[in-house]
Image (cartoon, rainbow, N blue to C red):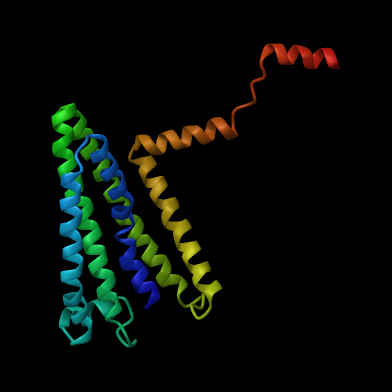
Amino acid sequence: LTAAALAIFSLAIIAEGLSPLFLRSFYALGNTKLPFLISLFTATLVIGSAPFFVSMFTIGRASGHFIANLMKVGDLPHVGVLGLAMAFTLGSVVDAVLLRLALFSEAKKYFGSGYANGFGVAFAKILVAAFLASVLGYGTLYLLSPLISLSTFWGVAEQAAITFLVAASFYGALMHVMGSQETEDIVNLFRRKLLSKEIVPMELDHERETLK
């Protein structure tokens, strides 16, 4: 059940990471009203949809039964908690999408269509990489579940750490392959820090030779 809930929450990781970035962008543009209204709408959506998603698992609906069996938790008690995870994930994704669309419109006003189009391409790359990394993360959890017990804290921590490393590594590699500028900057930074030789100013190098 824990693995299933984490799999659902993992779909919201990228949205939760992007939403603060979008909000700061709105603040930088001096527009705080629009993100407030969007956040208010998505909060209402989460609260309103939670009973529906919980009822999918608690009153025996076919859709809830299918999802529970797909995640291999159909025979476990308290499966309705997955409905809360689904409502939270839905709200997070809708919030990020609406903020992104609104920011796209604001960016066109200030910077022109060229900047907005470049932002859209970068956003699409992030969504694709995040979705595939989430699928891989769930697959990793599924493979680890019979090998690592979730009955102890350290078992849960170990499974979460391995899953995170696998999914994060895949996400970074895929973003690099797709030509993400941010990933390229990070790679170049590590190359400069780890592979480049230390450059000593000529004055210090001369003093070092004198001391010898």
State the residue in front, 98 or 136: 98
State the residue in front, 137 or 50: 50
Looking at the image, residue 118 sits to the left or right of residue 6; the answer is left
Task: Check the image and report above or below for 73 versus 37.
Answer: below
Residue at image location 16% in from the left, 64% down from the top: 45
Task: Check the image and report above or below for 153 versus 124.
Answer: below
Give x and y (percent) for residue 162: 49, 62
Q: Quadrant of the C terminus?
A: top right
Residue at image location 36% in from the left, 34% down from the top: 181
Looking at the image, residue 102 sits to the left or right of residue 163; the answer is left
Task: Check the image and report above or below for 207 versus 68.
Answer: above
Total marks shown come to 0
State the residue in front, 136 or 200: 200
Give x and y (percent) for residue 130: 32, 53
Give x and y (percent) for residue 179: 34, 36
Q: Residue furthest right?
A: 212
Give x and y (percent) for residue 44: 16, 64
Q: Quadrant of the N terminus?
A: bottom left
State the residue in front, 138 or 84: 84
Residue at image location 29% in from the left, 41% down from the top: 24
Residue at image location 39% in from the left, 75% down from the top: 2
Quarter of the view holding residue 105: top left
Looking at the image, residue 139 sits to the left or right of residue 120; the answer is right
